[in-house]
Image: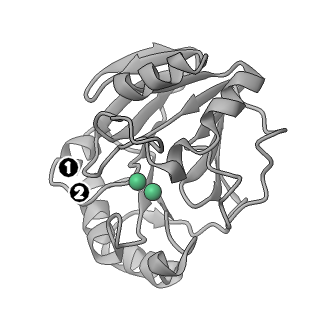
Amino acid sequence: MAFKLTWIGHASLGLETGSYQILIDPYFRNNPATKVDPDTVSADYILVTHGHGDHIGETVEIAKRTGATVISNAEICGWLRKKGVKVHAQHLGGGFTHPFGYLKLTLALHGSGLPDGSYGGNPAGLLLTTNDGEKIYMAGDTGLFGDMRLIGEEGLTLAVIPIGDNYTMGPSDALRAVHLLQPQHVIPIHYNTFDLIAQDAEAWAESVRTQTKAQAHVLKPGESFVHP
Ligand code: NI
Ligand code: MN
């Protein structure tokens, strides 16, 4: 079964698998890279990697309007539950079989404070095994870490990784990440939203193509990668 992954912009992703519409880190209103409207976007599930404003974004209002279940770490889910959001809490290393697939939270080297200063637990990456066995790793905001090799051992169809530098891996560490993850396909995100994270994604993709076996796909915000 195919899946379709859309880079909405910055770190916001849309994923369609089976009949499910999933939003990841839905940050729209103050996101210069997208015009997606949080008042009309649809979602069955919302996955939140960590508490920072450019990731939790409009999670609360979209979840309340759509009735989507939010999946994140226990601390963020506790914060969301108090706001009346339907949640499913997991934590690092733990997986659960949801209707759309088996989702595991993975290590991420970053912070996770929530916009109001609340404690947001540990940041996470997301490793989804779709119902037909495709493995999609969405690293979230993270620095390079050696245990990416363990994630790669799962056999990744697609890795979605940050290359923006400053807050996350930059291009050279992201290339090292591809060596560890060994995905069939890789998509760079979390760059060019702001001057501080400006990067030449095409040059990075070319380095991936020449130095690894992965197929690098540079999307424009709003563009999709469709896996048959
Ligand atoms: Ni962050
Ligand atoms: Mn971020």
- Tell me the number on the disc at residue 149: 1
Q: Which residue is mark 2?
A: 180
Q: Is residue 12 left or right of residue 191?
A: right
Rendering coords of residue 195 (x, y %) = 52, 81
Q: Is ligand 1 within 8 Å of the beta carbon of the residue shown at mark 2? A: no
- Extreme right residue here? 40
Rendering coords of residue 151 (x, y %) = 27, 42
Q: Is residue 70 above or below residue 170?
A: above
Total labels: the figure holds 2
Q: Is residue 158 above or below residue 122?
A: below
Q: Is residue 95 above or below residue 60?
A: above
Query: Which residue is at a point 42% across and 75% down the rendered structure image?
Result: 209
Q: State the scheme by which the image is colored.
A: one colour
Q: Quadrant of ligand 2?
A: bottom left
Residue 68 in which image quadrant: top right
Query: Which residue is at a point 63% across and 66% down the rendered structure image?
Result: 219
Rendering coords of residue 222 (x, y %) = 73, 59
Would you say residue 184 is visible in this rendering? Answer: no
Q: Is residue 1 left or right of residue 207?
A: right
Contact, mark 2 vs mark 1 (Cβ under 8 Å) = yes
Mark closest to the chain's N terminus, 2 or 1: 1
What type is the residue that disc 1 sits on? Answer: Arg
Q: Is residue 21 left or right of residue 98?
A: right
Residue 156 in which image quadrant: top left
Residue sitting nearer the eye, 150 or 119: 119
Q: Quadrant of the N terminus?
A: top right
**Please, what secondary structure does the residue beneath circle 1 have?**
helix
Residue sitting nearer the eye, 29 or 147: 29
Few, some or many residues within 10 Å of mark 2 (<14, 14–19, 20+): some
What type is the residue that disc 2 sits on? Answer: Leu
Few, some or many residues within 10 Å of mark 1 (<14, 14–19, 20+): some
Rendering coords of residue 6 (x, y %) = 66, 51
